């Protein structure tokens, strides 16, 4: 090889490394082309290309450490994956959807890179939603430095780890990008954003996507944020800018954002014909800026290598790809029998009897708020990996004022005193950004912590719905058990508050019980709240823990402290009252109202059996079925709107599987299909009342 002084000055990399850069870039490009060919031949099902992004991608990879740093790549990040250890074989097995696909077991589209050993976290197809996860992983790096016991349990927690997250310029329009940037700068996290700006969000040009056409101009005044811009098709410039960004992070000066201007050499995907919207002169200019061609020309112009040597590199790449193609096409396809694997943990089963621990009572009866707080204290004491955060959950963000103030501890005081006892690294406040509260929790859980987060009111959970449905609940399944995120989301829910109105009184649990991979719990007593929350925290899957706020301080559902080991398995209902005439299935705030109705009915000789589900997903079908077989009549009662509600699923299953045991139609009582209003009289007209339950029971009993 020829070696020049000019080339030596150009980079702090060896000649061999410069040629290796070309090999990785060329390998990435040829693999894109091969996958497109396979798609046209009907041998794969979808193709996404990283063509035009190779220079910035390889440049970033040269500054980072696989298995040490953490990576949240996006679908055009093929070259950094190849640079850091993901193989051609891995990518082609994913493309053909082979059983041995290492990314997802043929569950995800190609280009959803995942490798636990290398710390490449499985992405979803949603754009920008990975940014809060990256915040959580970077936050864990800082937190674990303050939590030595947690770090010891987790193992391998280097204090100098950098978290890499990349996304296209279109994804910077997503709210989660801005929420994540806010959190990253607030916490001054070791987080590297790489915005790969190819100018097109599918068919929308950047000037119609981003004000002024430049995201780096928009973010340049974020405190502590390094902002660097570069030609992402120029390897030398990209390498230098990423190096500056990494240096900023390593000096603990805060996060960094590199805005790399790339090109998109092919359509958005194989199904997109860019000629329909992209002018020919633009396409020609993109071809002129092609990073693979430019780097090859540079190597030859600077006499770093020879045409013959580069032909040898290219030939070796083509042979490597063809060998991998042959193996991928011969690989065994997935089997339908495996498709349900890893929806939930295969090693920790919260429905098992190991989670059935009896109470050992002590002290006077306490409210639901009290016993939830006691459970959180117990679990913080027991497991140093447990951390709590959310809006207003700490006693005071200003730690220096703690001796002088009473403290907040949540709007309902559920977390009162926890920051004082366990410190601000274990219980702390977060900005009002529900999507990023859940997204950060996902990242913390990926790193091995056990986050318990609070969404202040169920009515405000909707910004986080994308994170819960598309990210939290899918991660274990979509990564084929490569990653998991055992996050507990505590949420006050429901009405009967007198004055809560539209935005502090709603229910909607059925929208979450519909989500595979998510467990949903709603206790009705202080005792059950304590035991079920402990089960949720000790389980290995995401749990939505719904707390009926009407029940927080009621006297009728109090209990003495059941002790630090009390647990209730998920999917185990409670027979609140025995009866022979009809079965009433309910949960949450309607348990007490159902008991009131049953007491009145008993005076008329109608004996109602009441089942409190406690756990909505999974639920205790065996208890329901046994009761209906005995009574031959069934009523489902819940607070949420009656139409398309949770009760409809139970009623349908009872009618389907227990039809021969029924002596009457399955009935339901639920909230009216209307928002909960402010005035108590109007609220009472919307939410189920005792008289409605009594009337429906009369109707069933006399059928």
Image (cartoon, grey):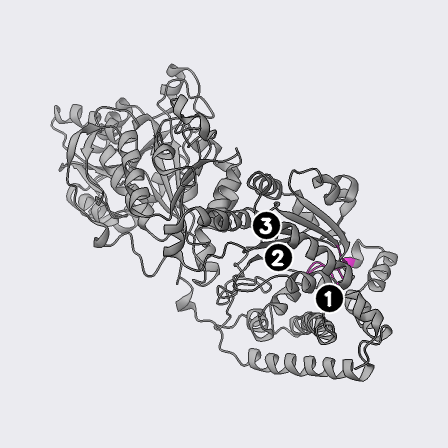
- Name the secondary structure under disc 1: loop
Depth order, front residue of 211/361:
361
Which residue is tagged 3? 191
Q: Where is residue 270 in the image (x, y as percent from the top left)?
A: 68, 63
- Name the secondary structure under disc 2: loop
* Residue neighbourhood size for the residue with mark 3, other residues' Cα within 10 Å, grouped as few (<14), some (14–19), many (≥20): many
Q: Which of marks 3 and 1 is in front?
A: 1
Which residue is tagged 2? 74
| Label of residue 163 in the image | none
Residue 453 sits in which quadrant? top left
Residue 347 sits in which quadrant? bottom left
Depth order, front residue of 334/580:
334
Depth order, front residue of 595/285:
285
Q: Give the range drawn in magenta.
A: 261-274
Which residue is tagged 1? 12
Q: Is residue 56 above or below residue 40?
A: above
Q: In this view, does 276 lie above or below 320?
A: above
Q: Is residue 616 left or right of residue 126?
A: left
Residue 21 sits in which quadrant? bottom right
Q: Quadrant of the N terminus?
A: bottom right
* Residue neighbourhood size for the residue with mark 1, other residues' Cα within 10 Å, grouped as few (<14), some (14–19), many (≥20): few
Q: Would you say residue 641 is visible in this rendering?
A: no
């Amino acid at each position: 090889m020829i070696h020049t002084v000019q080339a030596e000055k150009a980079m702090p990399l060896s000649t061999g490394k410069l040629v290796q850069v070309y090999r990785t870039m060329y390998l990435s490009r040829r693999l894109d082309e091969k996958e497109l060919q396979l798609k046209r031949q009907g041998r794969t099902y979808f193709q996404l290309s990283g063509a035009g992004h190779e220079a910035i991608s390889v440049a970033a990879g040269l500054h980072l450490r696989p298995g040490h740093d953490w990576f949240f790549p996006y679908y055009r990040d093929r070259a950094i994956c190849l640079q850091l250890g993901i193989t051609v074989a891995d990518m082609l097995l994913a493309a053909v959807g082979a059983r041995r696909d290492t990314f997802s077991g043929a569950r995800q589209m190609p280009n959803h890179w995942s490798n636990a050993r290398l710390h490449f976290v499985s992405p979803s197809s949603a754009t920008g939603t990975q940014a809060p996860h990256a915040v959580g992983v970077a936050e864990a790096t800082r937190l674990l430095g303050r939590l030595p016991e947690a770090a010891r349990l987790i193992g391998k927690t280097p204090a100098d780890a950098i978290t890499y997250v990349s996304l296209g310029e279109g994804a910077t329009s997503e709210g989660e990008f801005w929420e994540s940037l806010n959190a990253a700068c607030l916490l001054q996290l070791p987080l590297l954003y790489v915005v790969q700006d190819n100018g097109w969000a599918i068919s929308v040009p950047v000037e119609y996507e981003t004000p002024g056409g430049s995201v780096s101009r928009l973010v340049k005044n974020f405190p502590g944020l390094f902002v660097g811009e570069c030609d992402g098709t120029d390897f030398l410039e990209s390498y230098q800018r990423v190096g500056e960004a990494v240096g900023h992070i390593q000096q603990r000066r805060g996060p960094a954002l590199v805005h790399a201007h790339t090109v998109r050499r092919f359509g958005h995907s194989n199904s997109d014909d860019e000629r329909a919207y992209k002018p020919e002169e633009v396409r020609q200019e993109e071809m002129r800026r092609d990073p693979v061609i430019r780097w090859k020309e540079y190597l030859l112009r600077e006499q770093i290598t020879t045409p013959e040597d580069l032909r040898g590199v290219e030939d070796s790449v083509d042979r490597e790809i063809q060998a991998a193609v042959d193996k991928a096409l011969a690989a065994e396809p997935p089997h339908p029998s495996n498709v349900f694997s890893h929806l939930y943990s295969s090693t920790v089963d919260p429905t098992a009897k190991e989670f059935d621990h009896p109470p050992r009572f002590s002290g006077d009866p306490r409210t639901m708020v009290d016993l939830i707080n006691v459970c959180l204290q117990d679990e913080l004491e027991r497991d140093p990996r447990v951390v709590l955060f959310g809006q207003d959950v700490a006693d005071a963000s200003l730690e220096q004022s703690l001796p002088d103030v009473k403290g907040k501890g949540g709007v309902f005081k559920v977390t009162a005193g926890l920051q004082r006892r366990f410190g601000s690294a274990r219980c702390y406040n977060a900005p009002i950004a529900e999507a990023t509260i859940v997204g950060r929790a996902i990242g913390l859980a990926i790193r091995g912590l056990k986050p318990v987060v609070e969404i202040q009111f169920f009515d405000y959970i909707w910004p986080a719905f994308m994170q819960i449905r598309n990210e939290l609940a899918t991660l274990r399944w979509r990564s084929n058990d490569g990653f998991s995120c055992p996050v507990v989301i505590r949420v006050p829910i429901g009405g009967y508050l007198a004055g809560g109105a539209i935005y502090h009184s709603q229910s909607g649990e059925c929208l979450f019980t519909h989500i595979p991979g998510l467990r949903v719990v709603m206790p009705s007593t202080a005792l059950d709240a304590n035991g079920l929350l402990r089960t949720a925290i000790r389980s290995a899957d995401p749990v939505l823990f719904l707390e009926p706020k009407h029940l927080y301080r009621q006297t009728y559902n109090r209990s003495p402290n059941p002790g630090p080991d009390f647990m209730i398995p998920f999917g185990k209902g409670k027979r609140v009252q025995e009866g022979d005439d009809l079965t009433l299935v309910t949960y949450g705030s309607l348990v007490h109202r159902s008991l009131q109705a049953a007491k009145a009915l008993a005076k008329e000789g109608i004996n109602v059996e009441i089942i409190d589900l406690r756990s909505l997903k999974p639920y205790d079908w065996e208890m329901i079925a046994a009761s209906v077989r005995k009574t031959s009549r069934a009523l489902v009662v819940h607070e949420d709107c009656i139409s398309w509600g949770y009760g409809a699923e139970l009623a349908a299953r009872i009618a389907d599987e227990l039809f021969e045991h029924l002596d009457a139609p399955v009935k339901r009582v639920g909230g009216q299909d209307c928002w909960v209003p402010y005035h108590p009289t109007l609220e009472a007209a919307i939410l189920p009342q005792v008289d409605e339950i009594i009337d429906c029971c009369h109707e069933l009993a006399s059928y």
